[in-house]
Image (cartoon, grey):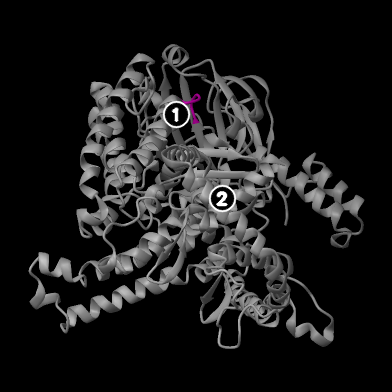
């Protein structure tokens, strides 16, 4: 149950990211528009001739101000559409249209109920017994003040209806309305009833939200500290969006009258005041308590942590680590995206993340105590600091106090991180014991085989990163949903036991988080491109291609499907028996290709390999060889297709067209070529028995976790099955396994 709840919350959190992503452009328009149409600002900087009333730029800035305000005024509708898109598994465009219709229907139904019960008259005037602020106008409709909660209720409900009914089949007479056409119809009916129900239910909910908001407001600085700590602590789980949204966008974060309108939520209050900045002496520090502190630790604190990790790195690795940490630091300073830094130490040294949570939470409290009121649209980077702090003036925001507070924060982060890293020998970047910090991935392997780098790939169908991700997630059949937030690929799988972190790490993520069937893979800001490529890759991949499964898994799944669908064969039992017979090699293959052993040693089934991903067949099928002789030979006639820079692995293509990989030992990539002597060149044609490389077995045994060497067929077709021919002692050239090819 806990994992199911986490999975739902993960999907809800990521669905918030689409409407939240609109806020930066709205904030930019509103920030520039309000800043440079303010008479005080214009007079202070002597720009009357350029920006004064009646100039072209003044008119343009007034329009920008109005556009930005319009987006914030209509956030509930934007959330309704955005959440529906984010939560819908298929037919997302239908879900978006249905959400818009449902939102209008729900609010019109509420308006009708308000009129029927005498709460408003036909002109929209409030009755005497109606409390000010409980009813508002949304898109010209008089309705209850539900804020973005109303949009979220619509988005979640419509997405559920879309996922349930987008494939419905109706009777022949009304079959035109089947499938996705039925979704807006059922959404309209359902949300007419929801609107009627909300008239009776929401006032009680609204009172509860108001009471909660008053409780939070009454908690003072301690409440701000708790908010900051909880928000940062939820970062690894990806649930921080779910947590902070009510404080930013609803009455939980406070209620205030701004320019004659009741505004709810800390961020909404700030931007309402920004739009009316000419009449505001100082923006509300109570409303900004939920985000102003982010500028202190994002622009100053985490850079201090990065400097500490750099100074604590091994001297020979500082140059490489410095480049990585510098890019992550700049991302934190300028955009407020902190996960590249946080995930660099989160999994290697969790104690540092605990320190980060406490220090960051304290920054929220310090900003509140200092009455700092700098708003933001997305995160606490310099761009928002410039727009909503510096340009608005110190009198309104107190932005100058961020500088001394940030300097203290920088010192605290640097000193605490430096002490803990050295005191407990924490393995932060650059302190690893291996000789080479570069980790080669399957993407590198695929790119080498194709003769190009992964960055040169333009076809999603051949995208090596997507292929690695599908393999690591247990194959296409195991993936039920793909989405992302600002920095994380968020995937829901059917069976979490089929997910391999070792393979996923080959795609180069900063971290991997498991919660039940919800998998979060942290890539940073480039995640949106990775998600788009993965979706294209999955769409083009045949449904029968289960990339992450072994042949035994495919046969078993095929048998299961056959038993569930007797119409696909003579009978269910017969289909299952046929699949079982094929798996047991009872059926005669149309052709068999015999592959010899490239190494003298001991042969065993691939499942005995001391690497979970390889043992499960996720890198290919073949055998596990433990070498007793240091010569690796061509197992049959063929061509050297590629050689890894670290010499630990060689690609080989047989003359019969079988793609192979000889991977010597486990985790031997970290040896950086030591213990290997390659005797051939890429593209060289070889005869069976020709030497490929020499191994220093004594060195490998002393420095590698294992010398068990997977000999793999990497790109088998569905009709090709590997059959082990030898177990136990085997000599180079002896028959090792057969590739049986069955007729389709």
- Which residue occupies the foreground of this view, 358 or 400? 400
Prevailing secondary structure of the magenta residues: loop
Where does the image place residue 578, in percent across and percent down from the top left? 85, 49
Q: Residue at horizontal 44%, vertical 34%?
A: 650
Is residue 413 rendered magenta in the image?
no
- Which residue occupies the foreground of this view, 690 or 718? 718
Residue 627 is at least partly visible in this image: yes
Where does the image place residue 501, in percent across and percent down from the top left? 55, 36
Q: Is residue 740 above or below residue 542?
A: above
The residue under label 1 is: 354
Q: Is residue 498 above or below residue 26?
A: above
User: What's drawn in magenta, residue-wise?
Assistant: 663-667
Q: Is there a contact, CB below 8 Å, between mark 2 and mark 1?
A: no
Q: Is residue 145 above or below residue 657?
A: below
**How much space separates mark 2 and mark 1, taking CA atoms?**
28 Å
Where does the image place residue 212, in percent across and percent down from the top left? 56, 50
Task: Report the side of 189 relative to 639 (left or right).
Answer: right
Quadrant holding the C terminus: bottom right
Q: Earlier in the sequence, mark 2 or mark 1?
A: 2
The residue under label 2 is: 212
Q: How many other residues sit within 10 Å of disc 2, few (<14), some (14-19) or many (≥20)?
A: some
Q: What element does badge 2 sit on?
A: helix
Quadrant holding the N terminus: top right
Residue 636 is at least partly visible in this image: no
Q: Residue at horizontal 37%, vertical 66%?
A: 272
């Amino acid at each position: 149950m806990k994992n199911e709840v986490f999975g739902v919350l993960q999907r809800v959190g990521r669905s918030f990211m689409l409407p939240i992503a609109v806020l930066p452009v709205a904030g930019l328009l509103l920030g520039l528009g309000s800043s440079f149409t303010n008479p005080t600002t214009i007079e202070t900087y002597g720009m009357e001739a350029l920006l004064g009333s009646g100039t072209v730029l003044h008119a343009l800035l007034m329009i920008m101000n109005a556009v930005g305000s319009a987006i914030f005024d209509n956030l509930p509708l934007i959330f309704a559409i955005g959440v529906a898109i984010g939560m819908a598994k298929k037919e997302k465009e239908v879900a978006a249209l249905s959400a818009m219709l449902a939102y209008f229907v729900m609010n019109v139904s509420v308006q009708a109920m308000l009129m029927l019960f005498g709460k408003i008259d036909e002109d929209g005037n409030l009755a005497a017994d109606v409390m000010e602020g409980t009813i508002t106008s949304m898109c010209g409709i008089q309705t209850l003040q539900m804020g973005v909660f109303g949009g979220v209720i619509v988005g979640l409900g419509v997405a559920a209806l879309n996922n349930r009914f987008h494939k419905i089949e109706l009777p022949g007479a009304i079959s035109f309305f089947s499938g996705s056409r039925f979704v807006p119809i059922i959404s309209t009916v359902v949300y007419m009833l929801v609107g009627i129900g909300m008239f009776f239910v929401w006032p009680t909910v609204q009172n509860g939200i108001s009471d909660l908001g008053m409780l939070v407001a009454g908690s003072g600085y301690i409440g701000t500290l708790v908010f900051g700590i909880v928000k940062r602590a939820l970062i690894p789980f990806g649930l921080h969006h779910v947590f902070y949204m009510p404080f930013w966008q609803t009455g939980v974060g406070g209620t205030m009258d701004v320019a004659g309108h009741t505004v709810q939520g800390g961020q909404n209050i700030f931007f309402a005041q920004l739009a009316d900045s000419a009449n505001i002496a100082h923006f509300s520090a109570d409303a900004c308590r939920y985000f102003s502190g982010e500028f202190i630790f994002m622009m100053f604190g985490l850079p201090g942590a990065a400097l500490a990790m750099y100074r604590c790195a091994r001297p020979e690795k500082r140059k490489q680590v410095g480049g990585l940490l510098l890019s992550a630091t700049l991302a934190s300073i300028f955009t407020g995206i902190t996960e590249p830094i946080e995930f660099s130490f989160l999994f290697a040294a969790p104690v540092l993340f605990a320190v980060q949570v406490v220090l960051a939470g304290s920054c929220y409290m310090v900003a509140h105590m200092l009455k700092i009121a700098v708003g933001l649209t997305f995160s606490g980077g310099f761009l928002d600091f410039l727009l909503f702090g510096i340009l608005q003036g110190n009198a309104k925001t107190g932005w100058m106090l961020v500088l001394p507070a940030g300097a203290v924060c920088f010192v605290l982060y640097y000193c605490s991180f430096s002490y803990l890293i050295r005191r407990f020998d924490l393995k932060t970047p650059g302190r690893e014991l291996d000789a080479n910090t570069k980790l080669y991935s399957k993407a590198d392997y695929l790119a080498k085989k194709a003769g190009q780098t992964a960055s040169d790939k333009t076809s999603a169908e051949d995208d090596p990163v997507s292929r690695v991700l599908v393999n690591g997630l247990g194959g296409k059949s195991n993936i039920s949903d793909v989405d992302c937030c600002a920095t994380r690929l968020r995937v829901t799988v059917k069976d979490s036991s089929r997910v391999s972190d070792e393979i996923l790490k080959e795609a180069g993520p900063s971290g991997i988080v498991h919660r039940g069937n919800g998998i979060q893979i942290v890539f940073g800001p480039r995640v949106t491109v990775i998600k788009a490529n993965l979706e294209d890759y999955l769409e083009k991949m045949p449904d029968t291609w289960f990339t992450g499964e072994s042949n035994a898994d495919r046969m078993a799944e095929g048998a299961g499907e056959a038993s569930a669908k007797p119409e696909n064969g003579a009978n269910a039992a017969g289909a299952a028996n046929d699949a079982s017979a094929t798996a047991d090699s009872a059926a005669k293959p149309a052709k068999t290709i015999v592959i010899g052993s490239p190494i003298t040693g001991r042969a065993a089934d691939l499942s005995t390999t001391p690497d979970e991903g390889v043992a499960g067949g996720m890198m290919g099928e073949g055998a596990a060889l433990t070498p007793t002789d240091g010569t690796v030979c061509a197992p049959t006639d063929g061509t050297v297709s590629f050689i890894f820079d670290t010499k630990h692995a060689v690609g080989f293509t047989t003359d019969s067209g079988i793609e192979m990989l000889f991977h010597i030992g486990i985790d031997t990539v970290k040896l950086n070529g030591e213990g290997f002597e390659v005797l051939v060149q890429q593209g060289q044609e070889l005869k069976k028995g020709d030497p490929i490389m020499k191994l220093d077995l004594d060195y490998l045994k002393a420095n590698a976790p294992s010398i068990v060497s997977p000999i793999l067929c990497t790109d088998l077709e569905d009709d090709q099955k590997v059959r082990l021919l030898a177990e136990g002692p085997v000599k180079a050239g002896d028959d090792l396994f057969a590739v049986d090819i069955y007729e389709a």
